[in-house]
Image (spheres, helix red, strand yellow):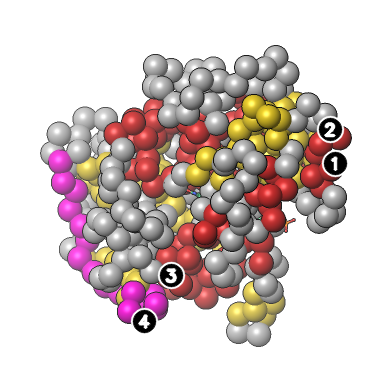
Amino acid sequence: MSPPATMNALVLTPSTKSVALKTVPTPNPGPSEVLVKVHAIALNPIDTIYVQLPIAESDRVIGTDFAGVVAAVGEGVKDRKVGDRVAGFQQGACSSNERPGAFADYVLSDSDLLWSVPNSMSLRDAAAVSMCGLTAAQGLFYRLGLPLPANFPTPSIKPASPAPVPTENPVVLVYAGSTSLGMYTLQLARRALPKAKIIAVASPKHAEFLASPPYGADHVVDYRDTAWPEAVRALAPEGVTYAMDCISEGETAVGVNSTLADNGRMAIFRSPQGGGFPADLRIPPIYGAVWEGLGHDFGYGGPVIPADPTARAFAVAFDEYLSQHPLEPNPVRLLPGGLERVTAEGFALLGGIMVAQRGEAVVDGVKLKPLSGEKAVFELVPDK
Ligand SMILES: NC(=O)c1ccc[n+]([C@@H]2O[C@H](COP(=O)([O-])OP(=O)(O)OC[C@H]3O[C@@H](n4cnc5c(N)ncnc54)[C@H](OP(=O)(O)O)[C@@H]3O)[C@@H](O)[C@H]2O)c1
């Protein structure tokens, strides 16, 4: 059955910073693109940040993570066919290209920037993987220069960072191990360095979970103890080799930086300006945005960043890797309703601009349990 001429979508009006459910034309796939019928969407902090600090100037469909079924293919597409189960992400509401986001009945994607969801995985679980999974992979392999995991399909792709750090006993630090980003970081770091010492910083309530496969943290240090940097330094007396600050807000970057070995490296996921921490840390952190992987010019709270073919090639390789060696999806919290509930329960749970400062979420007088070691997901087409 062909896709309908119109669809429901969550559309941002930047001038009023408001999002409304609207009926808009269903897009048509161009050459090398596919149209995906969206079955599930997952929420990310950036989905609300783009609404509160809009980058787009014209109305735009919002939303990042999706999973669904291919509904139509564009000219020249050979690697996907109608009916394929796939997942991916888009940069909803960006400035420098008009591409729509994922919070809609249908979404466009380049055919090679999707991964194949195995039949054993639900689409609601798959929706939780793509954006944070690639962010973790970019941080570890592309920016910090960890060796790629076994079976990465195109090992000839050169990571953007310099040569690997010379060390026989690398120590990996994953600050905020219970974030979506942190959990995928732990999985990938353990795959890449099966014998490395891996330290996570997270609430003790997540310790057993994060120490178990597929995460495999050797130690979990409590982030609410203000002396956590000292605790990490005691576990890694020669310093941390590779650090991922999966919050990158306020004091987190300063604390993580203080644990690094002199030849250590650290990846951050918010800029010093966006995350509110000093830019002149002892070891300069490496910052990047996952949107690079989409291969288009993009805006991200600063000047427009030009399309980067190397970052796109890495994303394509990572999607191939996910298709063959999927990550274990992070625990999912399925929220009731569909697109019409995203700005109510969904955005209330995501809170404001800073993850570390999320307040209590109350909707229609009902207090919502905060997101804790889980991904908020809405199903647009319920799993059978
Ligand atoms: N640059 C990029 O391309 C990119 C891509 C993806 C994400 N990000 C950024 O990465 C960050 C994480 O995003 P996410 O979606 O993974 O977050 P998330 O899953 O929504 O984070 C929720 C978790 O954060 C933990 N947490 C809150 N404050 C903390 C603190 N001060 N220290 C340690 N843990 C803390 C909470 O722990 P409890 O369970 O103990 O409450 C909770 O489990 C965000 O800043 C996001 O904007 C950037």
Q: Residues within 10 Å of mark 3 (few under 14, many from 20)?
A: few
The residue under the point 62% across, 38% down is 283
In this figure, which residue is indicated by the disc labeled 4?
A: 16
In this figure, which residue is indicated by the disc labeled 1?
A: 231
> Mark 1 or mark 4: which is in front?
1
Q: Which residues are magenta?
A: 14-31
Q: Earlier in the sequence, mark 1 or mark 4?
A: 4
Residue 135 location (% of width, % of height): 50, 42
Q: Amino acid at mark 2?
A: Leu
The residue under the point 65% across, 74% down is 361
Give the left or right position of residue 192, taking residue 370 as reference: left
The image quadrant in which ligand 1 is located: bottom right
Q: Tell me the tag on residue 235.
A: 2
State the separation of the CA atoms marked 3 and 1: 36 Å
Q: Amino acid at mark 4?
A: Thr
> Mark 2 or mark 4: which is in front?
2
Give the left or right position of residue 179, taking residue 77 as reference: right
